Image (cartoon, helix red, strand yellow):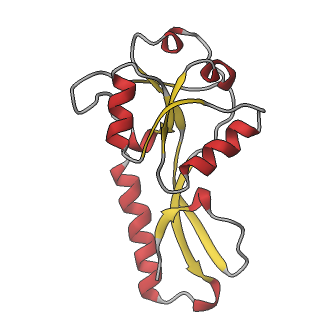
């Protein structure tokens, strides 16, 4: 069996093989009139001085704490939601900013308000999607075919 999952969140495991199929950058999302969206360069330190909308989904909070912590910083969390649409709407309405993956980016909220995204000068880990498998399971032809299909399908989807 080949589960597809966020491989960027996997701990090191010796008995599991892993293949990353997609790397999705994380960028700052904000309302077009937000002061950060007007800056030429944006650091996590800059972001920390503004209200932050935190997505509470899967291992996202642990990932956020980890990469902010590398710089001795933490976000100024104003609101938190387990709904990507709620986070998108809050950002689009100017309630705060968020750092999220390009994979889930859309330049508008459900209400039709605009959202911009900008890169950060500090290194923020990508969100990586891939496959895992048991190393002792062997590579049968069906598994190899599925892996190749997923590689091609993802490549075509992202064009």
* Residue at the spot 57% in from the left edge and 47% down from the top edge: 61
- 139 is higher (above) or lower (below) than 20: below
The spot of residue 30 in percent (x, y) is: 44, 22
Outermost left residue: 111
Question: As drawn, is 71 to the left or to the right of 21?
Answer: right
Quadrant of the rendering where the C terminus is positioned: top left
The spot of residue 76 in percent (x, y) is: 59, 27
- 26 is higher (above) or lower (below) than 142: above
Outermost front residue: 78
* Residue at the spot 62% in from the left edge and 48% down from the top edge: 63
The spot of residue 18 in percent (x, y) is: 60, 70
The residue nearer to you, when weighing 85 against 95, is 95
| Numbered marks: total | 0
The spot of residue 56 in percent (x, y) is: 48, 47
Question: As drawn, is 66 to the left or to the right of 18?
Answer: right
* Residue at the spot 54% in from the left edge and 49% down from the top edge: 60
């Amino acid at each position: 069996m080949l589960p597809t999952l966020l491989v960027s969140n996997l701990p090191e495991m010796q008995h599991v093989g892993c293949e990353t199929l997609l790397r999705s950058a994380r960028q700052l999302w904000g309302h077009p009139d937000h002061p950060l969206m007007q800056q030429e360069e944006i650091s996590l330190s800059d972001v920390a001085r503004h209200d932050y909308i935190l997505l509470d989904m899967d291992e996202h909070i642990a990932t956020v704490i980890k990469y902010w912590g590398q710089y001795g910083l933490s976000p100024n969390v104003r609101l938190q939601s387990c709904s990507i649409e709620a986070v998108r709407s809050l950002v689009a309405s100017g309630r705060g900013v968020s750092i999220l993956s390009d994979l889930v980016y859309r330049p508008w909220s459900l209400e039709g308000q605009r959202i911009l995204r900008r890169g950060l000068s500090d290194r923020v880990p990508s969100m990586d999607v891939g496959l895992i498998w048991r190393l002792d399971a062997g590579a049968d032809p069906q598994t190899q075919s599925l892996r190749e299909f997923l590689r091609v399908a993802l490549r075509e989807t992202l064009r």
